[in-house]
Image (cartoon, helix red, strand yellow):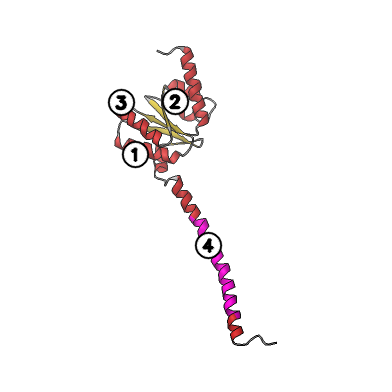
Amino acid sequence: MKDKDQKKKDVEDLKKAIEENKNFFITSYEKLTVKQDFQLRKTIRDAGGNYRVVKNNLAAKAAEGTPANDVLKDLKGMTSLAYTSTDPVALAKALTKYSRDNAAFTFKAGLVEGRVIDIKAIQDLASMPPKEEIQAKLLYLINAAATRLVSSINGVGRNLAVVLDQAGKENKFKE
């Protein structure tokens, strides 16, 4: 059993993780085997996240004064946190896929960019396209508009050149 100093250090470490990471998924992991837990941790690492099993009362203490306070204060049962400071969509996708394959792993709630989200919102987040795909689509739209603008500007100059050339051939410019 941990002594008071170790518990205090655990609370401080968890508080630091909560403050540094704005994207959390609060989960339950009842009846996971060691092999399933190992696979879960690997899945989360591959998605750029971290994973931690927490005691409910220590999580509540660590969350005091942070945006995570509302979601971590009244936890029941076995609780774990999956968190990331980067892309919450990638982590939500990885966790959702894992939960489909392992019924013992379930969601309790989430916190994305400081806002509390429910299980339905986590599933919606997981169905979004990856950040890179959204960025690629946005760049395509910007590039397409710029291309149309350049084509239009070139078209005006080209049309003017054709008219001037035709007028020159027909001797329309006499002094």
116 magenta-colored = no
Amino acid type of the residue tagged 4 in the rendering:
Thr
Q: Secondary structure at mark 4?
A: helix
Query: In the image, residue 101 lies at what x, y percent?
Result: 30, 36
Q: Earlier in the sequence, mark 1 or mark 4?
A: 1
76 and 3: which is toward the camera:
3
Q: Which residues are magenta?
A: 140-164
Kindly indicate whether the residue at mark 3 contacts the one at mark 2 (C-beta within 8 angstroms).
Answer: no
Instruction: Judge whether 29 appears above or below 164 on screen.
Output: above
Instruction: Judge whether 81 appears above or below 146 on screen.
Output: above
155 magenta-colored = yes
Kindly indicate whether the residue at mark 3 contacts the one at mark 1 (C-beta within 8 angstroms).
Answer: no
101 and 153: which is toward the camera:
153
Kindly indicate whether the residue at mark 4 contacts the one at mark 2 (C-beta within 8 angstroms).
Answer: no
**Which residue in the structure is indicated by mark 2?**
74
63 and 81: which is toward the camera:
81
**Which residue in the structure is indicated by mark 3?**
34
Q: Secondary structure at mark 3?
A: helix
User: Mark 1 against mark 4, which lies toward the viewer?
Assistant: 4
**Which residue in the structure is indicated by mark 1?**
97
| Mark 2 vs mark 4, CA separation in Å | 55 Å
